[in-house]
Amino acid sequence: MPVPQPNLYPPFNIVRLSHVEFGVTDLAKSRAFYVDTLGLQVTDETADTIYLRAMEERGHHCIVLRKCDRPEARDLGFKVFDDGDLDKAAHFFKGKDLPVEWVERPYQGRTFRTRDPMGIPLEFYTKMDRLPPIHQKYALYRGVKPLRIDHFNCFSPDVDASVAFYNELGFRVTEYTQDEESGRLWAAWTHRKGGVHDIAFTNGRGPRLHHTAFWVPTPLNIIDLLDLMATTGWVSNIERGPGRHGISNAFFLYILDPDGHRIEIYCSDYQTVDPDLEPIKWDLKDPQRQTLWGAPAPKSWFEHGSLFAGTAVSDSQLKAQPIIAP
Amino acid sequence: MPVPQPNLYPPFNIVRLSHVEFGVTDLAKSRAFYVDTLGLQVTDETADTIYLRAMEERGHHCIVLRKCDRPEARDLGFKVFDDGDLDKAAHFFKGKDLPVEWVERPYQGRTFRTRDPMGIPLEFYTKMDRLPPIHQKYALYRGVKPLRIDHFNCFSPDVDASVAFYNELGFRVTEYTQDEESGRLWAAWTHRKGGVHDIAFTNGRGPRLHHTAFWVPTPLNIIDLLDLMATTGWVSNIERGPGRHGISNAFFLYILDPDGHRIEIYCSDYQTVDPDLEPIKWDLKDPQRQTLWGAPAPKSWFEHGSLFAGTAVSDSQLKAQPIIAP
Amino acid sequence: MPVPQPNLYPPFNIVRLSHVEFGVTDLAKSRAFYVDTLGLQVTDETADTIYLRAMEERGHHCIVLRKCDRPEARDLGFKVFDDGDLDKAAHFFKGKDLPVEWVERPYQGRTFRTRDPMGIPLEFYTKMDRLPPIHQKYALYRGVKPLRIDHFNCFSPDVDASVAFYNELGFRVTEYTQDEESGRLWAAWTHRKGGVHDIAFTNGRGPRLHHTAFWVPTPLNIIDLLDLMATTGWVSNIERGPGRHGISNAFFLYILDPDGHRIEIYCSDYQTVDPDLEPIKWDLKDPQRQTLWGAPAPKSWFEHGSLFAGTAVSDSQLKAQPIIAP
Amino acid sequence: MPVPQPNLYPPFNIVRLSHVEFGVTDLAKSRAFYVDTLGLQVTDETADTIYLRAMEERGHHCIVLRKCDRPEARDLGFKVFDDGDLDKAAHFFKGKDLPVEWVERPYQGRTFRTRDPMGIPLEFYTKMDRLPPIHQKYALYRGVKPLRIDHFNCFSPDVDASVAFYNELGFRVTEYTQDEESGRLWAAWTHRKGGVHDIAFTNGRGPRLHHTAFWVPTPLNIIDLLDLMATTGWVSNIERGPGRHGISNAFFLYILDPDGHRIEIYCSDYQTVDPDLEPIKWDLKDPQRQTLWGAPAPKSWFEHGSLFAGTAVSDSQLKAQPIIAP
Ligand SMILES: [Ca+2]
Ligand SMILES: [Fe+2]
Ligand SMILES: [Fe+2]
Ligand SMILES: [Fe+2]
Ligand SMILES: [Fe+2]
């Protein structure tokens, strides 16, 4: 098995993925997508920035949209358990010769930026402003009724290396895809918060952000979103789905925002809190890996991703390919 | 508009589509598909025949599976309102020089066979044995929880001609697809019972049976069926879907039985009882016609169908083609 | 069996129930209920009147709200098949010495008012203005996503007599409740359009309108409405449910509008187009008759109803009572 | 606020609730309830014991049914993170002068029994036999499609004291009900695994087990279970629901097993992993606390519970009462 043993005693305690900032070229159009169509709630808004949260979140933001000249993904944000963990985290990254920069982030307490060894920009914090609950303000629910941010998925040119690094941080592998010929990882799903993943890695030119996922109550909410997008001018932003993933067993839909940032709508994976949870292995050649029901993903799904700001990309070493829709 | 005015005062009163017999090559395999997987209920069973009904039906059968050497579709069955209608129907078909043969059909009262002008074999009856209701015997529900047979869809080499004939029988067009260049019908949906259709016609080599549809309660039942088929050896029998049709607005899934007879699982179309219901027109080039969410149908969907027993087929005159999945 | 044989050849052809007008005391409050909460669409609006349709309806209105001094229900509207049927209907009612008055109704063609033998005000028409379809304008869906008006339910002081009259009009009984001791009908459900009912009668002081029902896609829409009403000031307008009826097998919720007009939200009954459909009999003492899951209806459900404008009421003769919630 | 500050650095790491054993008087009848009706999977079965797991669980058992002379609840089982935590836990309970007994439990590794200060029997372990995943074996799904055990709820004669103790163990309060007059806790929900609760406490004669809850995918599964129970002889075992809890926002149903052990079917609460999650306070007098939609709970719900084996009970000190259904 190419998956490392889980590190059950990591150097610091990451609670969960938290947020991401997207550079977007047309703020009004992005607002129409994220607010009017998906149904995220605006928590702050200025001439060039919109802060958003999902319906059950009490932290101030899970998505930050910032006007810029070209689309890009910025820091992937993670919440750590306490201030001690934050300092230990900074120490850890410095010890790996990775850049640690303490930054000011509106609505967040002490926050530092760094990068993983592939170059993915990350930020860590302990405290974010807390807002009153709105999960029972049913009049506010719109669109797909997004409940919370669920995970990031990144293209990595070396999935084995990415998994090794995040495993050291305490991310535990729940499922993975192996290339039988080379014995290497083609993809892996790793979690901190007790679901199938907080962050996943897929073989490909990278590092790039493949998608950011939101959790919704039931598959019917996803069908509602499809009906809404199909009849309000967003039909060409529907990329893949709906379907059931073999991996994670989740019901999914992939859509593209106006700048091509890919969003997954996701529900019904499973609980993974047991430290002795055995990772599930999939063969890259298994067509039910991608979609349990057999439909292959389109070509764009393997090729398109968001560039991270200021990050060089390289091709992946592993050339193996899963089945692509003709 | 190429659609004829509805004939609101037809020569006899057809209540609804009723049943169809499939010639199947392996009765045990077909039983595994229709009974164990779809969840239809067996109402009678012999060495070479299985009679099936859906959960809210009280008529004895909606599908008859009969062992034979090669797959074929047999008579499309329709229920007429009363015995007088049955005699008027026989008279009508004779008057069109179409063959009328009174036949013995187990569990049915007086029944005659005929063919429509394209050669599609039809049978008409007034009375079928009635069985006690089982729609509240929830322990019997299985698979996709099929509630009732909903419609037939046939390839026709001349959809204009097919629609003209069924229109004369009182079938009313609810939606249709027109080829803008030739002004001809490419497809049409026609009903008697107050839903979007009892029988529809699609341009193509024919006459052949394109599919037979069952009504289910909600899209979640369709998702359940996909999960079940995908994990019990039927994954390659999933042909298209799930999705929302532009036409009919219904949620759909197309699957193939072990002999390639195509079954649609279908829910949530709309009520059409008003005699002044205006047909909805779609352009053949509109990609949302097939699937509201934009995904084109696969090639097989335009090419594959069941031959009707003893019926010659011919190519369609209209060569226009909708978008096909690459 | 106390249910009369169905009259399969009625004197004129009623297509379906169509609409009802409610006298309401606060138009703005009623608008908040029917438009903002239920999600009906406004098709016309003046200082004292609001016309509403549901999402799949193309007729101009299913509910008319009219400002008045005290709450009342007005004519129950029915659509007949053609103009000949309309004249035959007028002739029929006159022949029964029932009042026939040709009236002007905005957005309707020739329309006459009459009363049934109990005094329920009725109106019949053939043509109502038709509006463009909106069932695929998903951005308009709100609240419970009401698709169409489904049925009326009326208190009758003599259900046997009510059923006998509507049976003569061609309404066919699908299910009924009998008082075993007296052998009399306690309630009955009768249809024209092919569902479980267009109009039902319940034993009680009357005639009064018990409720008006709307069809919705799935039980989850009903749960959404409950969540919305519970958190937007309407919690005390939730009267009964959600639950599954034994009778009709439908999933239901009963709510009260600001004037106490009772609305049912309803889904998943069954198709009844067969002329030989056998009515299903229920015993008044069967607790699963009301709610398959066993929960009795509250007292208000047996007592409260809307008065019809200008109609005297009398107590019912049949004193038998089903189980009432303590 | 009567809720203690969360203990974010507890003496040992409890991962989640794990399992419970029920003493049942008729094993066949209990099997019919838990296996044939709820849909739990048998993992081992002897003449007097049945081990059960839910569909996404890989641990050997979440419910153990053991034949005995009278119904009773036995140890509430919890999984701790590692062997060191198990020893620290034993040490902790000993330090509180609570009984610690190392016991043999089939399919579990080292396990000790103890009691909380109220007398609730508890057991702790690190390792339980792991079984292959079955969450994608969709042919095995039955009944309510139970995915995992979710929580225990116990009557406590002193909720303040219960909460204080479990808070010390690291259970974090997510929501609570306060009696405004006395300032005391009437109920509280506390978690370890990141949902609204692993264990909750309700004011009442105790300690007794109020209910054990299972997580299911959607409200429609709960409706399916109601339909199934209502038509297979279990209608009188339906106690309360379906409904939406104000507290936890979950969709719920309460049913009773053949011995009166109460089972909750539960879905759609929210994620609580943030260490700074603010508990939500409810007023005991708020009728939407119990059911967001306003329906009060029945009397039995406040009175009936399972006795714990060998445990004396006492009346609660706090006499305040929420609204009870008349
Ligand atoms: Ca720790
Ligand atoms: Fe994902
Ligand atoms: Fe179809
Ligand atoms: Fe009703
Ligand atoms: Fe609970």
Image: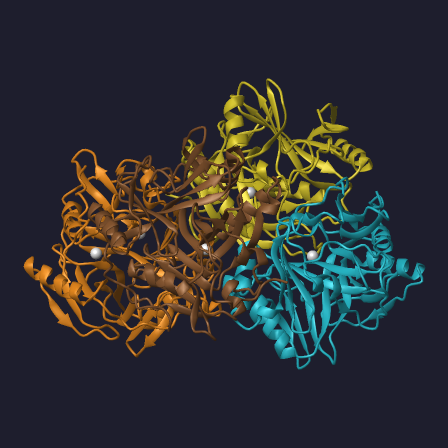
Chain colours: A orange, B yellow, C cyan, D brown
Please tell me whether residue D268 is drawn above or below residue A274 in the rendered image. below
Q: Position of residue A55 (x, y in %)?
A: 40, 65
Residue A191 seen anywhere in this rendered image of the structure: no
- Kindly identify the residue that appears in the image at 32 percent across and 40 percent down: A289
Compare residues A156 and A12 and report the one nearer the observer.
A12
Compare residues A260 and D188 and report the one nearer the observer.
D188
Q: Quadrant of the C terminus of chain D?
A: bottom right
Q: Position of residue D212 (x, y in %)?
A: 45, 49
Q: Quadrant of the N terminus of chain D?
A: bottom left
* D298 to the left or right of C124: left
* D66 to the left or right of A157: right
- Kindly identify the residue that appears in the image at 62 percent across and 63 percent down: C54
Place residue B107 in its image quadrant. top right
Q: Position of residue C309 (x, y in %)?
A: 80, 72
Compare residues B41 and D14 and report the one nearer the observer.
D14
* B31 to the left or right of A260: right
Question: How many numbered circles does the render carry?
Answer: 0
Q: Position of residue B20 (x, y in %)?
A: 62, 31
Place residue A113 in its image quadrant. bottom left
Residue D14 seen anywhere in this rendered image of the structure: yes
